[in-house]
Image: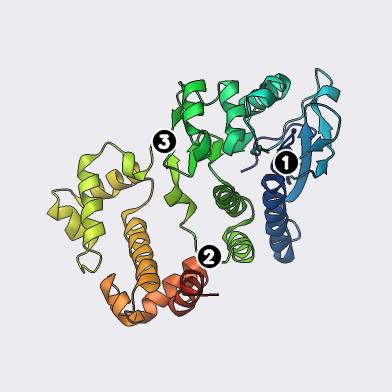
């Protein structure tokens, strides 16, 4: 995750900058900050040499900023105070949403917008939320790229930034090193994804469990990624994907499946990985786990019956996969999700 460091930067440090401006939504700052700190704390519990997290509040001017809720934030870094030759380059920059029409704020923050563009060009990763996406659109970085924004602002966004390929049906988009989130919940999912990349899967799962009781869809299923799994051009692999989706309990081997579709196993393996980005075995396993999760949440089938339905004749095999992927047994998963979905309290 960290970009190539400047010569004066600590290579074992993750620098995250959170941009502040008038009418910013405070939760768009505090929630990701607390989640990142929790991820770092979990990782350091087991490895004292893990990447250190350094966070800064960045504003255009060196003065207090009042959020929508009336909370005042003081910047750690003011762009107006940086010397022309000073290269302040964070690894990740978070651009939060604001509670109003963003146009007036955008007009007052040309220096900030230019700085965001400069940082991205130098290797920083940008993450914008809701109307904060407009800062990236103003910079031109989103021209001819996918993006999303808050549903309330979609039509104005389309008029203001016609060159951006807006995807309003997606809560998350990812293009190069630019992430866009439509909502605070989507932002939380991206933060979990970034924690996983930086501090590992166990840290990410720990943060997700502590900050969100509901079971979310994986980050990979919610985003619009240019060139994503279901948007590739290999029609034969797309047909095979559909077959896999509709034959979860089949005991056919992937070698036999390749032959059924007129491919050698080697060609099938290569084409599937090229088209989807993952191996066919991983793809089929993910399908089975996701279907099992849906059945655990929405049906009264026994765990053995669900295991059989998704192609595992041994209930223990399904349990091992759940513990490996979710750190929960199927029984615990069902109890957790049903408590969320069906509780009358």
Above or below, comparing residue 104 to residue 213 in the picture: above
Does the residue at mark 1 contact the one at mark 3 (Cβ under 8 Å)? Answer: no
- Image coordinates for residue 89, horizontal then vertical, percent: 73, 31
- Image coordinates for residue 66, horizontal then vertical, percent: 79, 38
* Distance Cα–Cα, label 3 vs label 2: 28 Å
On-image quarter of the C terminus: bottom right
Q: Of callouts 3 and 2, which one flags the residue occurring earlier in the amino acid sequence?
A: 2
* Distance Cα–Cα, label 2 vs label 1: 27 Å
Q: Mark 1 points at which residue?
A: 68
Residue at 54 percent of width and 48 percent of height: 186
Q: Name the residue under label 2.
A: 214
Does the residue at mark 3 contact the one at mark 2 (Cβ under 8 Å)? Answer: no
Q: Residue 226 shows which numbered tag?
A: 3
Q: Which residue is at the front of the view, 299 or 271?
A: 299
Q: What secondary structure is found at the residue carrying circle 1?
A: loop
Within the image, what quadrant is residue 127 found in? top right
- Image coordinates for residue 171, horizontal then vertical, percent: 48, 45
Residue at 71 percent of width and 45 percent of height: 29
* Distance Cα–Cα, label 1 vs label 3: 34 Å
Does the residue at mark 2 contact the one at mark 1 (Cβ under 8 Å)? Answer: no
Give left or right: position of 250 versus 205.
Answer: left
Q: Looking at the image, can residue 85 be seen? A: yes
Q: Of callouts 1 and 3, which one flags the residue occurring earlier in the amino acid sequence?
A: 1
């Amino acid at each position: 995750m960290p970009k190539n460091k400047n010569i004066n930067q600590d290579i074992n440090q993750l620098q995250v900058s959170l941009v502040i401006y008038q009418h910013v939504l405070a939760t768009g700052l505090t929630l990701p900050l607390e989640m990142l700190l929790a991820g770092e704390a979990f990782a350091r519990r087991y490895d004292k040499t893990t990447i250190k997290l350094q966070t800064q509040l960045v504003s255009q001017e060196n003065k207090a900023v009042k959020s929508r809720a009336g909370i005042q934030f003081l910047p750690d870094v003011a762009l107006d105070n940086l010397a022309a030759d000073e290269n302040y380059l964070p690894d990740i920059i978070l651009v939060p949403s604001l509670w109003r029409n963003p146009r007036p704020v955008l007009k007052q923050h040309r220096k900030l917008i230019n700085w965001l563009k400069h940082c991205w060009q130098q290797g920083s990763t940008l993450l914008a939320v809701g109307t904060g996406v407009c800062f990236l659109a103003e910079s031109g970085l989103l021209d001819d790229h996918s993006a999303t924004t808050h549903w309330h602002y979609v039509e104005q966004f389309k008029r203001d930034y016609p060159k951006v390929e807006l995807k309003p049906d997606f809560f998350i988009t990812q293009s190069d090193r630019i992430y866009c989130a439509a909502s605070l919940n989507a932002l939380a999912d991206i933060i979990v994804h970034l924690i996983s990349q930086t501090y590992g899967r166990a840290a990410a799962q720990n943060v997700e469990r502590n900050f969100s009781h509901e079971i979310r869809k994986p980050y990979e299923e919610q985003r619009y990624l240019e060139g994503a799994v279901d948007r590739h051009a290999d029609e034969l692999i797309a047909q095979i994907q559909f077959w896999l989706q509709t034959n979860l309990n089949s005991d056919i081997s992937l070698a036999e499946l390749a032959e059924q579709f007129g491919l050698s196993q080697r060609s099938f393996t290569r084409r599937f990985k090229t088209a989807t980005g993952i191996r066919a075995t991983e793809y089929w396993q993910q399908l089975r786990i996701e279907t099992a999760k849906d059945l655990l949440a929405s049906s009264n089938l026994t765990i053995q019956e669900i295991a059989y339905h998704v192609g595992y004749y041994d209930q223990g095999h399904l349990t091992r996969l759940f513990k490996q992927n979710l750190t929960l047994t199927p029984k615990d998963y069902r109890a957790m999700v049903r408590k969320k979905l069906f509780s009358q309290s």
